[in-house]
Image (spheres, rainbow, N blue to C red):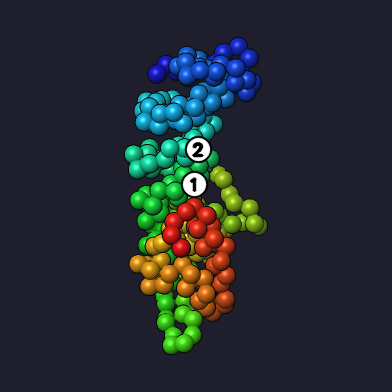
Amino acid sequence: VEPLVSLPGGDSGDDSLDDSLDDSVWRLGTTAQRLAYFRRLRAQDPAAARTLMGASWKKERAEAREGIVEALATGLGEADLPLLEMAITDRSGGVRQAAAQVLLHLPGSGLVQRAEALAASHMSVTKRFLRTAQVVCRPIEVTDDILRDEYQEWNNGAPARADVGAQSAGRAAAGDPHELLKEVIGRVPIDRWPALIGLSASELLEAEVTFEGEPLDVRDALFTADGRGGDG
């Protein structure tokens, strides 16, 4: 694949070149034109698009890398895991966040499996006769693994999106422990709860859930997971 060569007019967003899957668009087009080409190729031939991505990845600018990762959501499959696992360690925060969002749709991804492990190790269930279950949740330590998996870092209600550098204690301290736990819950496939904590998602929805002694509302997190598909 040849290096990107800007056509006259620069990144104007004009998609006039992507009327067909002519690979000259990929080789010579603007960023917007090349991404339009990639999305169309991905829709028609996911494997070919995956090969194209792998061949050109290191040469692409952050904007293009982010758009390419987002396009992988079309025709997504297990074969895309190596590329997405690479993208989640990208130097650009936007690329990492895009990769995390796509990986959430692959239950076999390390990102989802790490969320499952966190949920199982930070939620304790007590089943009670003729009463709903009690679920006691504990804070999750913010580690480099948490930062790598692009959990939202809550600071005055706005998620940070800093490009990678030193993963500072300041970023970790900005996290809201309640929101972090709820985001972990939202990343767990809805049909995995019985194996993780012995309750179905429906039972968890009805349970008495507490976090450090205070009620914790996990409804939105469970609905988020349910929206990605799976059995309730």
Residue at (50% x, 58% y) in the render: 226
Residue at (42% x, 77% y) in the render: 125
Amino acid residing under circle 1: Gln
Residue 43 rendering spot, x and y as whole percentages: 46, 31
Residue 70, label in figure? 2
Residue 45 rendering spot, x and y as whole percentages: 40, 29
Mark 2 vs mark 1, CA separation in Å? 8 Å
Secondary structure type for disc 2: helix
Taking depth in this image into account, of 92 and 190 the one nearest to the observer is 190
Residue 121 rendering spot, x and y as whole percentages: 38, 68
Residue at (57% x, 13% y) in the render: 7
Residue 101, label in figure? 1
Residue 13: image quadrant is top right
Secondary structure type for disc 1: helix
Residue positioned most to the front: 231
Residue positioned most to the top: 8
Residue 22 rendering spot, x and y as whole percentages: 47, 15
Residue 196: image quadrant is bottom left
